[in-house]
Amino acid sequence: MPWIALTHPPDALGILALALLIEAVAGYPDGLYRALGHPVTWIGRLIAALERRLNRGSGTARRLGGILGLGLLLAVTAALSLGLTALAALAGHGAGLVLLALLAASLPAQRSLFVHVRRVSAALRTEGLSGGRAAVSMIVGRNPESLDEAAVCRAAIESLAENFSDGIVAPAFWIGAGGLTGGALYKAINTADSMIGHRTPRYEAYGWASARLDDLVNLPASRLTAGLLIVSAALSRDVSATGAWRAIRRDAGRHRSPNAGWPEAAMAGALGLRLAGPRIYGETRVEDAWMGDGRAEATPDDIVRALKLYRTACALLFTLSASGAGLWLTFGR
């Protein structure tokens, strides 16, 4: 079955490199979203439908229901993505690879993340604090009315760092490891965690399996993201690679998340800032540890610096993917 090759290196790395390039240039077109939706919205509907049927009974029953729901979600996702991989292979190896890259380009979100974070900086400059709060509320879950300008800037930069890891590097890692199917399975897990992986009375038991699996599949990407940011800082001006490394070693393990501390500490150390720390979600104050030992008074200029570092890291991720595909093609066969 020749289509199986499209799920393994070097073809998976080739799919990844093309997907990253397509998404960076075009993003996910608004017209396509209006006409068909997005893979995340399709996955979300299935998660919601399963949750309505399975999240019932006692705590043990809910946890078992959550395990069953996650299993069904992954089975459906794997079946559909493997089916698409097989259909793409019918077009021939080269054409199939391009078709799968077009599909996989819907999984990372380089362009949209850049646009949303840049909008926070622009809003602060043109509309003041109220505009910045409105813009940052689109990308973070904390209460925007509790944020002053420095906190708005920190929130935007923290979101950039964390979403670079789980919204770009993680799907890229799993596309490179398993083609479209690897990336789609990761996206299903990550979407399930964002929807039901909360410690609330309704979801704590049911979402337990999704939250734990999301922690596991994000572990390699969070470390890779930190490495990308360190190398990108070494290639950039006005940021510090050694500061990023020191912050990771000192602070990453102190974050309440097993993964988010790595990219946030790297970004904080590179920019000479303090990120994370105490935050308010709704009416609840969360006492997070600080990442980095720099200044807490972040500015819109710091958001611009963070975005420059992010773009360099995205370019580095593409370069690694394309180089890996080329090297494997040259020496691996």
Image (cartoon, rainbow, N blue to C red):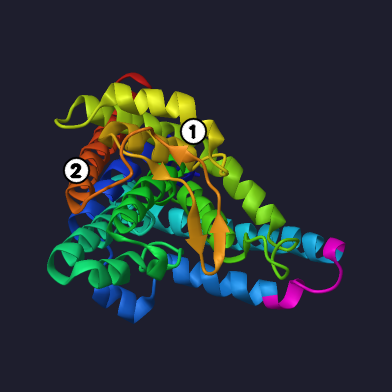
Mark 1: which secondary structure? helix
Looking at the image, is mark 2 or mark 1 earlier in the sequence? 1
Q: What amino acid is labelled 1 in the image?
A: Ala
Using a 10 Å C-alpha cutoff, classify the residue at mark 1 as few (fewer than 14 neighbours), some (14 to 19) or many (20 or more).
many
- The stretch drawn in magenta includes residue 55: yes
Disc 2 and disc 1: Cα gap in Å?
Answer: 21 Å
User: Residue 76 placed where, x, y %?
Assistant: 60, 63
- The stretch drawn in magenta includes residue 239: no
Residue at the location (21% across, 63% down)? Answer: 119
Q: What amino acid is labelled 2 in the image?
A: Arg
Mark 2: which secondary structure? helix
User: Residue 149 placed where, x, y %?
Assistant: 28, 59
User: Residue 8 placed where, x, y %?
Assistant: 45, 37
- Residue under pointer 2: 305
Say which of 6 and 206 sits in front.
206
User: Residue 250 placed where, x, y %?
Assistant: 47, 26
Using a 10 Å C-alpha cutoff, classify the residue at mark 2 as few (fewer than 14 neighbours), some (14 to 19) or many (20 or more).
some
Say which of 262 and 98 sits in front.
262
Residue at the location (29% across, 32% down)? Answer: 270
Whether residue 8 is visible to the viewer of this picture, yes or no, is no
Left or right of 215? Residue 221 is left
What label sits on residue 252 in the rendered view? 1
Q: Is residue 138 above or below residue 229?
A: below
Magenta region, residue range: 52-60
Furthest-top residue in view? 331
Q: How many marks?
A: 2
Residue at the location (24% across, 55% down)? Answer: 114
